[in-house]
Amino acid sequence: MARQIVIRNTTPDDVAGMDKLSQLVYNYDHFSRVDEFLSQIRIFPEGQFVALDISTPDAPQVVGYTASMRLSFDPARPRFKSWADETGYG
């Protein structure tokens, strides 16, 4: 059976699946990124996308996602202090 993949803007309902995928891909189990994902959706919802496999028995299943952040840029100051400071911890 061919997979049916749908790409759309991310919603809070997708976050648990995104966190599960992140743990699988990045091989961590000591923290959750749920709060970061929710923050990204709240701050810049039009820049967040999710890929869903709608052909699985437990559909929809998150099989990919992107995250975009809008950052202010001022050439007079250093670009990054730290990732956490620049992004407001996610």
Image: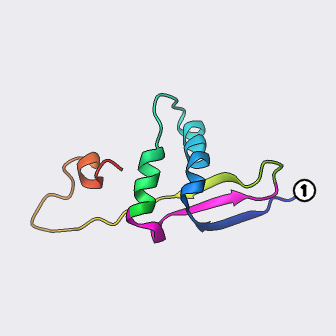
Instruction: Please tell me which residue lies in front, 1 or 49.
Output: 49
Q: Position of residue 35 (x, y in %)?
A: 43, 46
Q: Residue furthest right?
A: 1
Residue 51 located within the stretch drawn in magenta? yes
Q: Is residue 37 left or right of residue 22?
A: left
Residue corresponding to mark 1: 1
Q: Residue furthest bottom?
A: 46
Q: Say how many tags the image has.
A: 1
Q: Is residue 67 above or below residue 58?
A: below
Q: Is residue 67 above or below residue 46?
A: above
Would residue 45 be visible to someone looking at this image? yes
Q: Position of residue 7 (x, y in %)?
A: 64, 66
Q: Is residue 88 left or right of residue 8?
A: left
Q: Give the residue drawn at x 45%, y 61%.
A: 41
Q: Which residues are magenta?
A: 43-55
Q: Give the residue drawn at x 76%, y 53%.
A: 59
Instruction: Please tell me which residue lies in front, 12 or 23.
Output: 12
Q: Give the residue drawn at x 54%, y 56%.
A: 12
Which residue type does callout 1 highlight? Met
Would residue 68 be visible to someone looking at this image? no
